[in-house]
Amino acid sequence: MKKIDKIIALEERLAHTLFQTEELSEVVANQAERIQVLEKQMKAMMEMMRDAAQAEGSVTLGDQPPPHW
């Protein structure tokens, strides 16, 4: 293989690697955004459950004995 052919092959591999890196970066960024949305939703749901439990005067799950007692 000639020197120029090796350089071209390396440039092609580098271009492919850069393209994959950019694609993966986009995936990670999208996942981070989705995680933030899910965390907010989960926090809101937990607050709603806590508020509902307090409004009913019930005992929270952490304070209840296991079912076999």
Image (cartoon, rainbow, N blue to C red):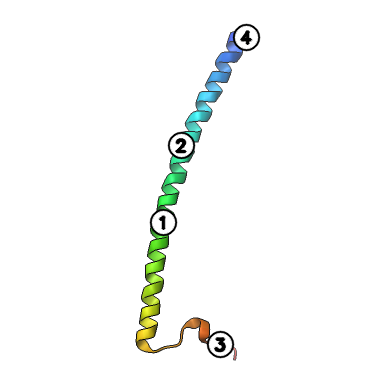
Q: Which residue is painted at 62% across and 9% down in the image? A: 3
Point out residue 49 in the picture as x, y percentages from the top left corner. Answer: 39, 77
Tell me whether circle 3 and circle 1 mark residues in contact (CB < 8 Å): no
Task: Name the mark nearer the viewer: 3 or 1.
Answer: 1
User: What's the distance in space between the residues labelled 2 and 4, CA to CA?
Assistant: 30 Å
What type is the residue that disc 3 sits on? Answer: Pro
Task: Name the secondary structure under disc 3.
Answer: loop
Residue topped by disc 4 = 3
**Of the image marks 2 and 4, the number of the one nearer the N terminus:** 4
- Please determine whether, in this image, residue 50 is positioned above or below residue 10: below
Tell me whether circle 3 and circle 4 mark residues in contact (CB < 8 Å): no
User: What's the distance in space between the residues labelled 3 and 4, CA to CA?
Assistant: 75 Å
Task: Name the mark nearer the viewer: 3 or 2.
Answer: 2
Mark 4: give few (<14), some (14-19) or many (20+) Cα within 10 Å: few
Residue topped by disc 3 = 67
Point out residue 8 in the picture as x, y percentages from the top left corner. Answer: 55, 14
Residue topped by disc 1 = 36
In the rendered structure, find residue 23 and report the number of the disc placed on it. Answer: 2
What type is the residue that disc 2 sits on? Answer: Glu
